[in-house]
Image (tube, rainbow, N blue to C red):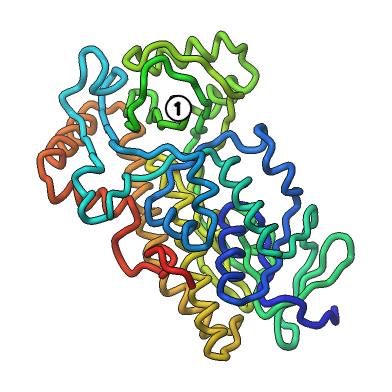
Amino acid sequence: MTAAPSHDVIIAGAGIAGSTLALALKQGGLAPLLIDPQPFAVQLEPTFDGRSSAISFASFRAWDAIGVGDDLRAHVQRIEQILVTDGHSAGAAAPGPSPFFLRFDASEIADRVNSEPLGYMIENRRIRAGLSRAVEAAGIEVLAPARIASADFEAAGGAQVRLDAGRDVSAPLVVGAEGRGSPLRTLGGIETIGWGYGQSGVVATVKLEKPHGGVAHEHFLPSGPFAILPLSDNRASLVWTEKTLAADALRGARPDVVLSLLKRRFGAFLGDIEVVSPVFVYPLSLQLAERLTANRLAVLGDAAHAIHPIAGQGLNLGLKDAAALSQVLVDAARLGEDIGSAMVLERYAAWRRFDNASVAAAMEVFTRLFSNDIAPLRLARGLGMAVVNRIGPARRFFMQEAGGAVGDLPRLLRGEAL
């Protein structure tokens, strides 16, 4: 391959994390190129991704800083409270509630976070649509559909990649943001560690009879975690965990069967429900990249860390990656450094490796602790929730940590433009 450098950064994966990175780099004066095997139009279809995401207030600050927040805000639902319960019924609001519960309330930390909520719920397709509009408005080049067939990370002056159509493109740095199956990560020689949980996440959107009040419910039931996450227009995203075989059986189940199952899981405290989306099933596993960087290569988002969705931190970790990497690269470029050099990339890796590993480890412990019905463990975790619920400083720390406001934050997560 002999192509001359054509861009500053080649980003493989035009999903949420990749597009956020591209917009941040463009704001900082760099020229990114987005490559994705799916056309943007396909990513915006309701059947492409049925998930909704809990976005921390720090992550939303980053979207505000790169100019996409106002577009997305039209579709968000503020999370004002989070109610965590452990028992055999649908939470503290249901008849016969468990005495073990934990309640987080945004009003407790309002004075510390400028009255921001605990987070924002928004459908992934809405996020993708807002980011795609921003990418187009910013004039960022997108090659889609296109796949990277091969890569040369030892080329003089940068990395060169060849697309499946035969076109060559090059840049000082290539970023893998294509998800847990990242081809670039493999081409760059970065190994992964991880394992499956033998579980799948089942996702559906429902219309509620009674107002949800901006309350997110996380119930730990004998069959696994079950979340009721508030959406706009008095809807909710339901996310529950099932054994893989049981979850797979729901893919083609009749709507009345799905509704009956949901009602048994859901309880009656929010009134009647109506399923208003297809049922989506996603296998659950843990996967961590052994390194975040290699020669002329960085990975972020699910390409770097794919974790259990039990606490809704996966996408937020990817957005933190994008905020940190964009700041490192923009600052290096302003100093005249080679943005793809090992020295520059190590700044990104050093910034993100501990946070990524510690959150993944915490989610692993959390998953193992709460994905069972062993009586002594149920008692221990219930008592633990009850104790934390009575300690105000502990609750407030957890709320700020979940909101992404703790630690050495990149400028974007503080709401500052690059």
The residue positioned farthest toward the right in the image shown: 166
Where 281 sits versus 190, above or below? above
For the question of whether residue 102 can be seen, the reply is: yes
Depth check: 252 or 115 in front? 115
Q: Quadrant of residue 95?
A: top left
Q: Please name the amino acid that badge 1 sits on.
A: Ala
Q: Is residue 31 left or right of residue 4?
A: left
For the question of whether residue 180 can be seen, the reply is: no
Q: Identify the residue at horizontal 44%, vertical 43% (top origin).
A: 308
Q: Is residue 6 left or right of residue 99?
A: right
Residue 42 at x, y = what percent? 73, 42
Disc 1 secondary structure class: strand
Depth check: 205 or 175 in front? 205
Where 107 sits versus 86, above or below? below
The quadrant of the picture occupied by the N terminus is bottom right
Q: Is residue 378 left or right of residue 249?
A: left
Where 305 sits versus 172, above or below? above
Depth check: 411 or 282 in front? 411
Q: Identify the residue at horizontal 53%, vertical 84% (top origin).
A: 332
Q: Which residue is mark 1?
A: 236
Badge 1, how many Cα within 10 Å: few under 14, some, many 20+? Answer: many
Q: Quadrant of residue 54?
A: top left
Q: Identify the residue at horizontal 57%, vertical 91% (top origin).
A: 336
Depth check: 223 or 35 in front? 35
Q: Identify the residue at horizontal 39%, vertical 18% (top origin).
A: 266
Residue 31 at x, y = what percent? 67, 74
Residue 90 at x, y = what percent? 31, 20
